[in-house]
Structure formats: structure tokens, C-alpha cells
């Protein structure tokens, strides 16, 4: 299992992300070779999932992408071709989603509302599909902020950072508190960082501490690189770099 979980955007370990992509090639040889649509010279291709932003208007998203942050441009600077993948197009179609994801080396999940993202993952079947693909070492999972948070066993505490009741049109209203369970502790992004979410991150940390729950608070720039099997050991120092 190869995970790259960042507090904010790519963070300070871009080289580790490239190493995850390169280092998995020998493992992948034990699985059936699938045709992939590579549009750049180094052959790395990412699916960019931005469903955590589905609670804002398309116009606002386009403005943010053009003026503040474009994930495709950031990945492109690392030599990774990027293609948008909207989980809403696969609501109720997990088989179609798996077929599409098999065309990529990396899934890159951006920030926004973690509860909206988790709903999208559930309704599309992404949660089950990605766990199976990661267990078989068929893909790298990377993400930041909400995209990193959902890797945890639970979204407990994140309700102090994101509104759990946000449900855009076409989404189920039920709040999903379970994370993907890829790691064995919570992630709190934007901790003590020059970020508007920093104060909320402090509240989340206090909440998790008061309940004795395991977590790791990440400052912007910090990244967790996880390269061992899911839940393989109770000692997180063996899996976190």
C-alpha cells in the first residue's frame, strides 16, 4: 500500500511522491498489465478528484483554480499528467469506477469539505474500490487536507473543521463518520500554520485529545508517507515517514 497524505497541496516531499510512483513498478509486474492512457513522457498519470469542493458553485471553483490553485498544474510540474475524475459520474456504478481508475498510476484527492468527499466516495463505491486496489498495490493514493483526512478510521474531530451536514444536490443526506481506514489514526491538517483553518485545527486536536483518540497533527508542508500494508502493525513509527 502506497499513500501520500499531505496537509496542504503537494507539501515538502514531492520527491517521495515520485518515489512511490517509481518504486511500485516492480510490485505491479505481478498483476495483469492494463492499458493506460499516458500523455506525458515519463508515463505517470493521475486522476484528480475534487469532489470535496462540490458544495461551492462551478464558477467559484473555476475562479479558484485559475487564480489560486490548479492541481493539474502542480502535478504537471512534477511530470505527472493529470485528468479530472468526478465521482458523481459513478454514483451507483462502482464497476465503472474501478475500470476507470485502472487507467491511472495515482489518484490525487484535493481539499475541501471532508464530509462531502466521504459521501461522494460512498455513493460511487470509491471507498471499497480504492481499498481493494491499494491492497493489491495497483495504484498510489495521494491527497491533501480533506483528501488526507478521509484516510483515517473516523472523521471524529473533523466536524470542528468542516460542516458534517453539507450535502450538495444529488448527495445523500446521511453523514458518514467512518473514514477509509487506510491508516490507524486521525489526521488533523493545517495545524499551527498560516492557514485560515489553523484555529479550527487546534479545536480538533483538543477534541481528539480529550477523548484519548490517536491522531497526528500536520503543519502545512508536512506529509505522511505510508508504504506498508493497511493496519499491519500497531506501531505507527514503522509505517510513517
Image (cartoon, rainbow, N blue to C red):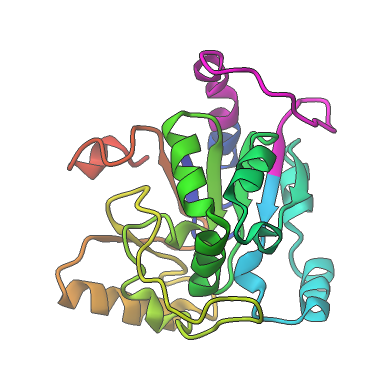
Q: What residue lies at 50% left-to-right and 44% top-to-bottom?
A: 130
Q: Do we see residue 97 in this rendering?
A: yes
**How many discs mark residues in the rendered view?**
0
Please say if 115 is above or below 35: below
For the N terminus, the quadrant is top left
Q: What residue lies at 36% left-to-right and 71% top-to-bottom?
A: 177
Q: Position of residue 162 (x, y in %)?
A: 47, 80
Q: What residue lies at 60% left-to-right and 69% top-to-bottom?
A: 52
Mostly what secondary structure, the magenta segment? loop
Residue in the foreground of this view, choosing between 131 and 114: 131
Q: Do we see residue 12 in this rendering?
A: no
Please say if 184 is above or below 161: above
Q: Residues in magenta? A: 19-46
Please say if 27 is above or below 205: above
Q: On the picture, is 164 further left or further right than 85?
A: left
Q: Classify residue 239 by image quadrant.
A: top left
For the C terminus, the quadrant is top left
Residue in the foreground of this view, choosing between 219 and 99: 99
Q: What residue lies at 61% left-to-right and 33% top-to-bottom?
A: 18
129 part of magenta stretch: no
Please say if 42 is above or below 80: above
Residue in the foreground of this view, choosing between 132 and 41: 132
Amino acid at each position: 500500500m502506497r499513500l501520500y497524505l499531505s496537509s496542504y497541496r503537494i507539501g515538502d516531499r514531492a520527491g517521495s511522491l515520485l518515489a512511490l510512483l517509481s518504486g511500485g513498478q516492480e510490485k505491479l509486474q505481478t498483476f495483469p498489465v492494463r492499458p493506460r492512457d499516458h500523455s506525458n513522457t515519463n508515463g505517470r498519470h493521475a486522476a484528480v478528484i475534487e469532489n470535496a469542493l462540490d458544495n461551492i458553485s462551478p464558477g467559484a471553483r473555476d475562479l479558484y483554480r485559475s487564480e489560486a490553485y490548479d492541481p493539474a498544474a502542480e502535478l504537471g510540474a512534477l511530470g505527472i499528467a493529470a485528468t479530472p475524475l468526478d465521482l458523481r459520474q459513478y454514483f451507483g456504478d462502482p464497476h465503472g469506477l474501478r475500470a476507470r481508475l485502472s487507467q491511472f498510476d495515482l489518484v490525487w484527492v484535493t481539499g475541501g469539505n471532508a464530509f462531502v468527499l466521504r459521501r461522494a466516495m460512498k455513493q460511487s463505491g470509491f471507498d471499497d474500490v480504492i481499498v481493494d486496489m491499494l491492497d493489491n498495490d495497483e495504484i498510489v493514493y495521494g491527497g491533501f487536507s480533506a483528501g488526507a483526512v478521509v484516510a483515517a478510521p473516523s472523521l471524529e474531530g473533523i466536524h470542528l473543521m468542516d460542516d458534517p451536514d453539507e450535502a450538495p444536490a444529488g448527495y445523500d443526506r446521511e453523514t458518514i463518520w467512518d473514514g477509509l481506514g487506510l491508516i490507524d489514526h486521525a489526521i488533523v491538517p493545517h495545524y499551527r500554520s498560516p492557514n485560515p483553518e489553523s484555529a479550527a485545527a487546534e479545536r480538533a486536536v483538543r477534541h481528539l485529545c480529550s477523548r484519548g483518540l490517536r491522531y497526528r497533527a500536520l503543519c502545512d508542508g508536512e506529509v505522511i508517507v505510508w508504504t506498508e500494508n493497511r493496519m499491519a502493525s500497531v506501531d505507527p513509527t514503522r509505517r510513517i515517514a
